[in-house]
Image: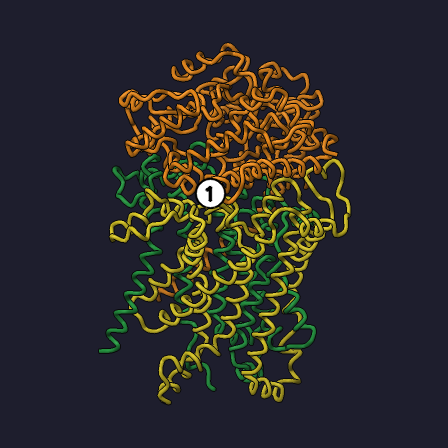
């Protein structure tokens, strides 16, 4: 009897599902047909978007819930729906490439942009991107970020990102004060400090090596120091007259990193540890320092309810004293093949009003500011951030980070990280790590048909 | 089996066309050719082109075997990737197939709670890989992980390992997690096979006084050829194409210690060298198809002999 | 006595193995009731405070109801169509091993080894106007599981005695009747196994719908979990709650199916 009931249930659900599967789709196509009709109609009148659907393709982590309120308001204002498609981060670029190459992209798509990214990731912006040149919101984007949004003199992207110091050292200030530890300014200081901290059975510098993308930040974020040691290096790397291999400052930094790793200062098993539990480790006082964004302080305090205070300092590997300036960030683009380009334009305009910018910032618990030219937006800088940034001389803030200021470097982020770990485990030489980067970049340059590599 | 075929030919030959109509094949064949094989072959053809991230500008051009020669002459260590792939295939299958078979036999007999055990053992194969990676990275963590804590609690501290970063241990951890995930799946196929063996065979054997091992050797194993072949072919295909489990646990690391062919091809793809990546995949396809078809042929011969 | 000891040993083995399986699952389950940072510890401890609201939150934010109905319609339709049509095909391939049919068998088998190429698949489906709708996604799923189904089912049909066909034919049954009334009941364990394994395959595959649709309305349930992953901030409690909800349907299918696997083959039906 029981069996029969179950079978019956199963059958009913099957039939229902099949009906749903087959029955819905004609209706769906119908509605999209009627939508098309509407679009054509609205294109001719150029104002009424009612009933249209705006689709957005974005990687997990780029919009989070920050745009939710703004999108809801946009939907109400124009009587449209927004279809937000959040794609797993490691699938995103493949999915985007597939959608672009099969001419089936969403109305708006995002890329992680930097000054070279439009050329290397979108490849043919003329074909794929709506040209926004002359849009009213161009002035909202700060000069430094504009280079990640333009290509060949045309404006394509809109980058609304924060300007907090990214991936600098976050440390437990209270713990430092209690133990009379000093913030290190040089590598020698750092090493001594780590020894002291390790004596207390605390992990001096938490490095989540198993994430695969974090530990190499300690090499790339201090790009300024390589440029300072050999002025003209960035230019040389970009026109193929300089190489990573043999660069003494880089070798020095790698050696220092390995020294810390060998001494166990990065955690007993940093290579096998990921960042899942990082904020708890801070809250439990198992960890004294880590590389993170300044806003991470807020997150530790919120997550763990700790009453400890935290501070920031510059990563002292290679005796670095430069601030990691990064003009890159997630950036949105309009798709040239969109069925309703006017709606896309309306969305970009909508996002750049003071009201929306403020709303986006207010809904970003992880960020303390939004880097835009709009004085009316109320920023929420942390006192720690202001203190930290005030202490850095302006001339140390000029050089961008290595990964986004040199061509093709960022494409091999994960490879470099793997090589770096191989070096720390003694299965690879430091100079070979750098040589691999050169070889990989040459490979990319070849694909891109770069004149300088011919 | 052979004798059945003969009877059949004697009695039903005339009707064969009528009772086994060829149109039964149409639906699967059409779907398979149009929506699976054709796109896949088209995909393979890309391995003979210079398809890359720039192709939107330059178009895709035929380059012959250039991608293949480049793979075999490249300075990258693809050879170690191939070797890792092969050893993974052999080891992972051995540690899954044998225990799964024993388990299936055990759970086939009248054991209290066997239904529950079966369901539980199957559970791991439904977890998404991302979650398996997440959970096991936590369990295998050196300081805070469950495994090392249990070992400590049992006073087996000597056995503690850096499971995912020690070069001598990392493969074993991967095999372990892979078996954890895969045994239930393999077992399910074996169970289906065991269920097609008529109970009367065992009854007859029991009357003849055959012991447990004799029954396994002379009834279970021969009658299970089909299921074993299925598991072997799937296991080999899975092993040669292995990607996710390595990607979520180590992503080819630490360093490059656990790189396999697919992780290399993934890297090529993500750096925009689509043509090269497809070529590497095609080599893998060749190897897989060769081994797979060999297994099927050898096993089918065995079937006929019975 | 000896039997008893054996039984206890067997139970022990099973219990230990099941523990090894259950602990990680328990970890996922228990952490799905915790707060975000408590869940990040992934400990086995009970939550300080049971947050059942995690589930409500996940269902709402992840649009799980829509995802569930999508996943269910993909998995059920694709799997049923594939299993039945492949069973019919395998039946003919197996019973009438002509040169052509043997060739077809190996030809289909090759599909086991080919990797899916989404770019070309999208192009082909585009040609048939099958992108961006459910039938397209279902067809893609069905087609991809054909090699698996034909291979599996053919190997099990071999063990269904051919005398049954004769008997049926003598009784005047046509091919459809013979197949559905005689063969299918005997193949139940195999078909159900095939169904379970493929159902699970479709259920957990989020890539196919992802590449084949440009609207989140068509996304399957498994996609939802990625909304809770962030680069700097992941909601572990939501992730775990989502996983539990996504796993439940597959577990139900397995438990239902299992009854058929076990009870499927009646020893009396076969006389040798």
Residue B288 % position (x, y): 60, 61
- Tell me what residue is drawn at x 37 percent, y 43 percent: C241
Q: Is residue A433 left or right of residue A196?
A: right
Foreground pick, C260 / B220:
B220
**Chain B appears in which tint?**
yellow
Q: Looking at the colours in the rendered structure, which chain would you say is drawn in green?
A: C
Badge 1 marks a residue whose secondary structure is: loop
- Is A442 rendered above or below residue B231? above
Is residue A450 something one can see in this rendering? yes
What colour-coding does the image apply? by chain
Residue B83 % position (x, y): 56, 57
Residue A41 % position (x, y): 68, 28
- Is C12 rendered above or below residue B61? below
Which image quarter is the N terminus of chain A in? Answer: bottom left
Which image quarter is the C terminus of chain A in? Answer: top right
Foreground pick, A18 / A101:
A101
**Chain A appears in which tint?**
orange
- Tell me what residue is drawn at x 41 percent, y 44 percent: B134
* Residue named by callout 1: A425
- Is C191 rendered above or below residue C209? below
Q: Residue furthest top?
A: A375
């Amino acid at each position: 009897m029981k069996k029969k009931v179950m079978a019956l249930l199963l059958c009913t659900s099957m039939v229902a599902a099949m009906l749903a599967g087959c029955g819905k789709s004609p209706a769906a196509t119908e509605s999209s047909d009627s939508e098309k009709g509407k679009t054509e109609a609205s294109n001719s009148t150029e104002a009424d978007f009612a009933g249209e659907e705006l689709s957005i393709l974005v990687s997990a982590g780029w919009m989070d819930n920050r745009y939710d309120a703004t999108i809801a308001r946009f939907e109400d204002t124009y009587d449209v729906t927004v279809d937000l498609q959040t794609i797993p981060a490691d699938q995103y670029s493949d999915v985007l490439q597939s959608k672009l190459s099969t001419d089936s992209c969403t109305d708006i798509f995002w890329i992680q942009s930097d000054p070279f990214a439009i050329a290397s990731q979108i490849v043919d912006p003329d074909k794929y991107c709506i040209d926004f040149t002359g849009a009213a919101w161009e002035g909202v984007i700060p000069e430094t970020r504009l280079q990640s949004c333009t290509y060949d003199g045309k404006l394509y992207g809109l980058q609304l990102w924060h300007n907090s110091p990214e991936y600098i050292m976050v440390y437990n200030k209270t713990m430092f004060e209690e133990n009379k530890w000093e913030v290190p300014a040089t590598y020698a200081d750092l090493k001594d400090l780590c020894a002291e901290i390790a004596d207390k059975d605390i992990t001096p510098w938490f490095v989540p090596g198993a994430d695969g993308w974090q530990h190499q930040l300690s090499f790339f974020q201090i790009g300024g120091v390589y440029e300072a040691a050999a002025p003209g290096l960035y230019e040389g790397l970009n026109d193929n007259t300089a190489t990573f291999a043999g660069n003494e400052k880089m070798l020095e930094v790698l050696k220092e990193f390995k020294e810390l790793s060998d001494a166990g200062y990065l955690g007993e098993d940093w290579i096998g540890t990921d960042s899942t539990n990082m904020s708890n480790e801070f809250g439990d006082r198992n960890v004294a320092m880590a590389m993170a964004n300044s806003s991470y302080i807020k997150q530790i305090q919120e997550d763990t309810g700790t009453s400890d205070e935290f501070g920031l300092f510059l990563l002292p590997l290679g005796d670095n004293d430069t601030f990691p300036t990064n003009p890159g960030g997630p950036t949105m683009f309009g798709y040239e093949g969109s069925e309703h380009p006017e709606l896309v334009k309306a969305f970009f305009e909508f996002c750049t009003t003071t009201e929306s910018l403020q709303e986006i910032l207010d809904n970003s618990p992880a960020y303390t500011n939004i880097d835009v030219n709009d004085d009316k937006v109320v920023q929420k800088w942390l006192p720690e951030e202001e203190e930290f940034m005030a202490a850095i001389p302006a001339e140390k803030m000029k050089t961008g980070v290595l990964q986004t200021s040199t061509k093709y470097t960022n494409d091999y982020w994960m490879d470099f990280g793997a090589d770096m770990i191989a070096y720390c485990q003694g299965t690879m030489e430091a100079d070979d790590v750098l040589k691999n980067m050169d070889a990989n970049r040459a490979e990319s340059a070849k694909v891109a048909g770069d004149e300088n590599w011919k | 089996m052979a004798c059945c075929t003969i009877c059949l030919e004697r009695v039903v030959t005339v009707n064969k066309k009528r009772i086994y109509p060829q149109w039964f094949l149409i639906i699967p064949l059409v779907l398979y050719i149009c929506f699976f094989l054709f796109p896949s072959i088209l995909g393979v053809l890309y391995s003979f082109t210079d398809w890359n991230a720039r192709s939107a500008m330059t178009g895709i051009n035929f380059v012959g075997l250039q991608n293949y020669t480049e793979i075999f002459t490249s300075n990258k260590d693809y050879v170690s990737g191939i070797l890792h792939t092969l050893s993974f295939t052999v080891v992972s299958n051995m540690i899954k197939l044998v225990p799964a078979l024993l388990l299936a036999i055990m759970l086939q007999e009248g054991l209290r709670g066997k239904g529950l055990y079966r369901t539980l053992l199957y559970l791991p194969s439904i977890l998404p890989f991302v979650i398996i990676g997440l959970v096991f990275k936590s369990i295998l963590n050196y300081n805070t992980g469950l495994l090392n804590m249990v070992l400590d609690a049992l006073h087996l501290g000597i056995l503690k390992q850096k499971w995912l970063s020690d070069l001598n241990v990392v493969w074993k951890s991967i095999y372990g997690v892979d078996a954890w995930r895969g045994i239930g799946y393999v077992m399910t196929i074996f169970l289906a096979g065991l269920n097609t063996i008529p109970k009367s065979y065992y009854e007859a054997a029991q009357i003849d006084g055959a012991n447990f091992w004799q029954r396994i050797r002379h009834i279970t194993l021969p009658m299970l050829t089909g299921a074993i072949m299925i598991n072997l072919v799937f296991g080999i295909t899975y092993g040669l194409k292995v990607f996710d489990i390595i990607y979520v646990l180590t992503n080819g690391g630490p360093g490059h210690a656990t790189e396999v062919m697919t992780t290399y091809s993934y890297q090529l793809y993500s750096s925009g060298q689509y043509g090269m990546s497809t070529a590497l995949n095609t080599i893998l396809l060749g190897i897989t198809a060769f081994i797979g078809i060999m297994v099927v042929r050898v096993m089918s011969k065995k079937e006929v002999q019975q | 006595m000896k039997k008893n000891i054996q039984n206890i040993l067997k139970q022990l083995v099973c219990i230990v193995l099941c523990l090894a399986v259950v602990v990680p699952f328990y970890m996922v389950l228990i952490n799905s009731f915790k707060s975000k940072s408590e869940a990040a510890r992934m400990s086995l401890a009970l939550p300080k405070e049971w947050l059942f609201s995690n589930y409500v939150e996940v269902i709402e934010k992840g649009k799980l109801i829509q995802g569930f109905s999508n996943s269910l319609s993909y998995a059920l339709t694709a799997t049923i169509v594939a299993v039945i049509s492949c069973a019919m095909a395998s039946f003919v391939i197996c019973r009438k091993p002509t040169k052509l049919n043997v060739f077809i068998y190996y030809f289909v088998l090759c599909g086991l080894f080919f990797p899916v190429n989404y770019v070309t698949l999208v192009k082909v489906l585009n040609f048939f106007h099958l992108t961006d709708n459910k039938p397209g996604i279902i067809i893609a799923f069905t087609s991809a599981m054909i090699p698996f189904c034909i291979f599996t089912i053919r190997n099990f049909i071999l063990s269904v005695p051919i005398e049954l066909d004769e008997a049926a034919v003598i009784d005047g049954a046509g091919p459809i009747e013979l197949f559905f009334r005689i063969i299918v009941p005997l193949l139940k364990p195999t078909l159900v196994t095939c169904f379970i394994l493929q159902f699970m395959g479709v259920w957990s595959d989020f890539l196919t719908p992802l590449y084949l649709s440009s609207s989140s309305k068509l996304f399957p349930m498994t996609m939802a979990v990625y909304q809770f992953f962030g680069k700097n901030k992941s909601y572990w409690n939501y992730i775990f709650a989502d996983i539990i909800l996504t796993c439940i349907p597959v577990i139900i299918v397995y438990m239902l199916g299992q009854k058929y696997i076990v009870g499927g083959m009646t020893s009396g039906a076969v006389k040798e």
